[in-house]
Image (tube, rainbow, N blue to C red):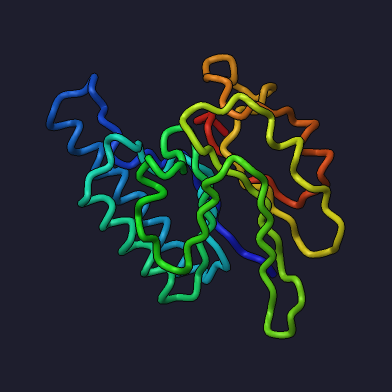
């Protein structure tokens, strides 16, 4: 059975400018602790993969301390044979001029950083398809195209997971968000995937 944990919009090192300095430190540290607990959960539950649906951090706010923290946490997953699939969002875009692209991620991390659709097929020791991750990243901090329309339709029995940082136009709260990589619920349903791991709108 395929097991994974899906998270998104972690926003490590968010500034929280409207808060007091003391509260800003508490909130930033709280986000780090929450991420570590997510990694703990992955290890405890022996998941196959951690899926990160964009905005893991805020590009211009990311400290080297937090960069080291992320690498250490991903290495903990690597030591437990857990893969990481991470698509970039509008706050952590993947172009070479941004931080997500310049960090040397551990080898268990697959970064979807380009504004094009990619499919990663995970196979077992018998060369049989176990599952597929279909994703695209935000290459820059602005993406107005509906790239979900370009995702391939599921054609085999292995589980397919769509991983994308997108504004679903019919979602609760969509009106209060910028139209980054907008798509519709119908666009996703038409692909026949088993699960969509989404980010961007901070609501269930």
Q: In x, y percent, where is residue 176?
A: 52, 15
Identify the residue at image location x=64%, y=48%: 135
Identify the residue at image location x=40%, y=47%: 100
Choose between 46 and 108: the one closer to the eye.
Answer: 108
Toward the left, the furthest residue is 22
Q: In x, y percent, where is residue 90?
A: 47, 32
Q: In x, y percent, where is residue 127?
A: 74, 80
Choose between 10 and 112: the one closer to the eye.
Answer: 112
Q: Is residue 78 left or right of residue 53?
A: left
Asked if residue 134 is positioned above or below residue 73 in the image, the reply reads above
Asked if residue 20 is positioned above or below residue 124 in the image, the reply reads above
Marker count (numbered): 0
Identify the residue at image location x=69%, y=22%: 170
Toward the bottom, the furthest residue is 126
Toward the top, the furthest residue is 175
Name which quarter of the figure residue 68 lies in.
bottom left
Q: Which quadrant: the C terminus? A: top right
Q: In x, y percent, where is residue 45?
A: 51, 68
Q: Is residue 182 left or right of residue 112?
A: right
Asked if residue 40 is positioned above or below residue 180 in the image, the reply reads below
Identify the residue at image location x=39%, y=61%: 105
Name which quarter of the figure residue 20 lies in.
top left
Name which quarter of the figure residue 160 lies in.
bottom right
Q: Which quadrant: the N terminus? A: bottom right
Asked if residue 105 is positioned above or below residue 144 in the image, the reply reads below
Q: Is residue 157 left or right of residue 79?
A: right
């Amino acid at each position: 059975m395929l097991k994974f944990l899906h998270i998104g919009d972690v926003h490590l090192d968010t500034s929280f400018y409207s808060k007091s300095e003391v509260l800003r430190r508490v909130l930033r540290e709280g986000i780090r602790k929450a991420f570590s607990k997510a990694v703990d959960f992955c290890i405890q539950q022996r998941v196959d993969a951690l899926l990160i649906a964009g905005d893991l951090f805020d590009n211009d706010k990311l400290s080297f301390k937090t960069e080291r923290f992320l690498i250490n946490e991903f290495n903990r997953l690597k030591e437990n044979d857990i893969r990481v699939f991470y698509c970039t969002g509008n706050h952590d875009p993947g172009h070479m001029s941004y931080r997500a692209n310049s960090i040397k991620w551990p080898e268990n991390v697959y970064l979807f950083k380009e504004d094009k659709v990619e499919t990663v097929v995970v196979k077992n020791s018998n060369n049989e398809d176990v599952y597929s991750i279909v994703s695209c990243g935000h290459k820059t901090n602005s993406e107005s195209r509906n790239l979900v329309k370009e995702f391939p339709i599921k054609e085999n029995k292995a589980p397919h997971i769509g991983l994308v940082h997108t504004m679903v136009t019919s979602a609760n709260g969509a009106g209060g968000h910028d139209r980054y990589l907008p798509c519709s619920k119908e666009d996703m349903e038409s692909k026949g995937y088993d699960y969509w791991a989404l980010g961007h709108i901070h609501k269930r």
